[in-house]
Image: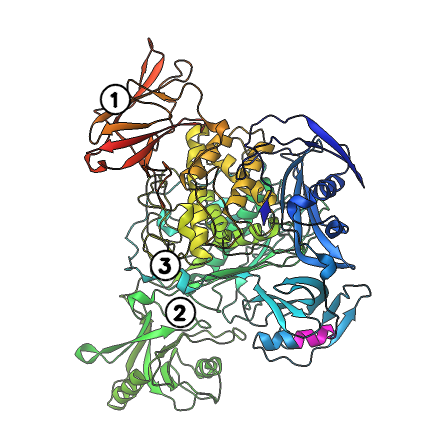
Amino acid sequence: MRSTPLLAAGLGIPLSLTLMIPGGAVAVPEEPAAAPAAGTAFFLTEPSSAPAEDVARDVLRLKASEYGVSAADLADLQVLSQHTSDHNGVTYVNLVQHYAGRQVYGGVATVSVTKDGSVLHVAESLVPNLREATGKAALDAAEAVSSAAEGLDLEAERPQVLEKATGAEQETTVSAAGIADEEIPARLVWQMTDDGLRLAWELVIDEAGSDHLWQVMVDAQTGKTLTTEDWTDHHGEGHLTGLARSPQQFAGAPAAATSVLPGSPVPVADGSSYRVLAFPKESPNDGDRELVTQPADQVASPFGWHDTDGVPGPEHTITRGNNVHAYTDQDANNVPDPGSEPDGGAGLDFDFPMDLSEHAQTYRAAAVTNLFYANNVIHDVLYRYGFDEVSGNFQVTNYTGEGVGGDDVRAEAADGGGTNNANFSTPAADGGRPRMQMYLWPGNQFGPQSGLTLGTGSDAVTYGANYARFTPAPTNAGFPGVAVVVDDACVPFAAPGAVVITARTTACSPHAQVSNAEAGGAVAVVITHNIATQAAPILSGSMDPAVGIPAISVSTADGEAIRAQVAAGATSASVHKMSSHPGIRDGDLENGIIIHEYGHGVSNRLTGGLNINCLSGNEQMGEGWSDYLAITMLLDPALDDPEQARGMGPYALFQPDRGGAGIRPAPYSRNMAIQPFTYDRIKTSSWITGGSLAAPHGIGHAWAATLWDLNWNLMDRHGFTDDLYAEWDEAGNTRAMQYVMDGLKLQGCGPGFVAGRNGILAADAALGGTDSCVIWSTFARRGLGYSAVQGTTNRDDNSEAFDVPPTCDAPGAGLVGAKYSNDALNVVDAGDAAPVQFNLGGDLGLDVLRDAHSPMSQQISCETREPLQFAVSVPTETTGQRALTYNARQERYQYNWQTDEAWGGTCRQLIITLDDGTQHRADFRFEE
């Protein structure tokens, strides 16, 4: 993705040059001769009364050569999507190239047009040389599905064409063919390859019984798979850094309860109530659940959370409504388990018990209720920040009549598709229903979750066991009975009051074995594994019909020992939770993980607009936006500190509080000793360990680290509000979230870090540009400064820079003093105090510095005076307690910088950042 090189924000618009082109007129400001390549400025054209889509087409065609394409390549630009945001008046026009009547996949541009018809920002990835496109459709859509299935290693039944449209794209519906949960849409498009554009079938395959949502491009002539994209954002264990760390148990009493998120200023009076971990609580680490009443917001959910028809009164009394349908899917078949949607009754009272000392399966109703609540709060809050109906949010019914409905979130609790994980699938088209899958976190680091105690007194032996997804969980109290060995549990048998011991078999399913035991009067079942070389597995099975007794699995060796002990006369048995295990944890009680997953849907829907999923490339920030939304929406100054660690997902990892290391390569913190990211560290073998940040999770965490800084820097200037329903300019944290949400809409397809930065700067410009220098100084500190170069979205061709644009140089004469210059390399004896002075045009008080991390210094090359690779800025120290003084006679501020003897023979840059983000900088060489 290319983000148009422009001038620094805040520069005045020069005289304009009006050029007439087909479709209208665009007045383009003349660019100065020496526009810096890395800078950003906005408002690229003069106002226009033409429709926004005409303005967008005109500016692209006018500047075609700057985008590396010809006028012929832009002859057929069609609107992929467009919408206008009320809070800033910007219309986001997403255009896509067409050739010979077919879409050029990936040939897109996002042109953002202000309410007065000026072009605010352009981000594009346009494709050149369309007339060289080749290929003929030798395969039909059904044959393409067969080819795609082979490439995905799926066994397809014979695909059948169910419906086919006329036209160049031949939009076709193909049968599910045994490989998909839904019918498969297909169409002909142009796909860019190393050999140029090829005609390809685009297929979207929602893989049956799986968490994969595939987009596959199949060459329409050869049947070769050209590209495969998974529209599900996964979080495999290899990316969850914290799982490899030493486990920490839940540390007794939770932290002092935080206040509940202030409710909507216009709540829906539907009488509803939910006992949940109310935001900003992240998890049980932060306090107990509370009964929240009538939390739905009239702006985002005008008829409450249980409505779907727009008429007062709920259509559902279960955890289902316009924004989300929450249920368990423990058998991983992508449909609700029977009876798994808690029912609040006519009064919509969702208050269910929960005992955290037990395994998570014992409080499923409480967990599903929390999942339902969290998804709805996310929906309602983000609606106010621009993820609304017209921009493609997730709703059954779009009450405004804008956008396409039918796409509420399917939120699947305790999903049986895996453990220690979560994921989110986002169809590209508005109206495509997303799926969130939340998993259990078994805590294998603590040993077996469950056990069988056989025998009594000194003869009692306890065997560790794994758990079953499809049965009730063993409890601390246990399920006592008489141990009975049943050789064949695949047929009905009688075992009243028994703990049945049987073996896993291929003759029938574990569900059938446990169902037969329950029908025969058993109280619990122990299934011994039938593969001696494997550990006891998690037992999976159907949830229909439900079974009411617990089952556990033990290894082959333990099974033999248990049978021998029973044969020797041991009959007293109990299946129970292991007292040494703190209890299986449920991601549905980790609000941060829920927000993170929902955030994938937000970033996919808003980047490039609707009808395309285009977060591509290695320099991809999807994981970062998701982490950012999680820790921002749950930000609590009573528990969070900008200079301390903030972990992601601590509860799921059995860490005691949000200061835990979490699941990322480093926790979030403005303190660079804790979170040392700078832009070059995304490169291969460039992380602090000498290794490479994993893509996409590690790279995404680096982006979130920068946005977390932005939160606190804006809060230093504008304060904090705990009311996320407030207006965007209420406080620093609401401003940051608005800029980030708008930046998603502005940045265009295939963004890298610099493009993402530019989108946020453009978002600020659209709202008046008040915070541009705060944003610049925040990004500059992490190496994403004015001169930073993104290159492509390859992780290894970027160049970091730590400067800010000239418009963000602080006012006055710069750093001065008896021996110091703002331009020269100043010489100081290492370890001496360096009294630096600066002028702000008068006495503005002593709170002019940004709190906590100003002034800062970082090491630079004594020869080039450029920051060293991976240079991090660190806080300075001052002599005594004299941090900052003002000399009224000289009209100068003075800061007594205490240097370090260890700096002898090196050079450093001193950076003084003021409250508004502007900076004074000066360079020093330290003599030994």
Query: Could you tell me residue 704's position as x and y percent?
Result: 45, 47
Residue 271 is drawn in which quadrant? Answer: top right
Is residue 138 highlighted in magenta? yes
Magenta part, dominant SS: helix
The structure residue drawn at horizontal position 42% and vertical position 91%, both measured from the top left corner, is 488
Is tag 2's residue or tag 3's residue first in the polypeptide sequence? 3
**Would you place residue 443 above or below residue 613 in this image?**
below
Using residue 741 as the reference point, say whether residue 43 is left or right of it.
right
Q: Which residue is mark 2?
A: 473
Please state, as top left, top right, bottom left or bottom right, where the C terminus lies in the image.
Answer: top left
Q: Which residue is mark 1?
A: 882
Q: Identify the colour scheme used.
A: rainbow
Residue contact between numbered discs 2 and 1, judged by CB atoms under 8 Å: no
Instruction: Say what amino acid the circle numbered 1 marks.
Output: Arg
Query: Could you tell me residue 586's position as x and y percent?
Result: 42, 60
Residue 433 is drawn in which quadrant? Answer: bottom right
Mark in front: 3 vs 1: 1
Highlighted range, magenta: 137-146
Query: Could you tell me residue 355's position as x and y percent?
Result: 37, 58
Q: How many marks?
A: 3
Given residues 792 and 207, the one toward you in this image is 792
Decide: few, some or many residues near mark 2? Use Cα within 10 Å; few <14, some 14-19, many ≥20: many
**Distance from Cα at disc 2 to Cα at disc 1:** 62 Å
Decide: few, some or many residues near mark 1? Use Cα within 10 Å; few <14, some 14-19, many ≥20: few
Q: Which residue is mark 3?
A: 241
The structure residue drawn at horizontal position 31% and vertical position 22%, both measured from the top left corner, is 820
Q: Which mark is residue 600?
A: none
Residue contact between numbered discs 2 and 3, judged by CB atoms under 8 Å: no
Instruction: Residue at the far left: name it.
Output: 458
Is residue 903 highlighted in magenta? no
Instruction: Say what amino acid the circle numbered 2 marks.
Output: Ala
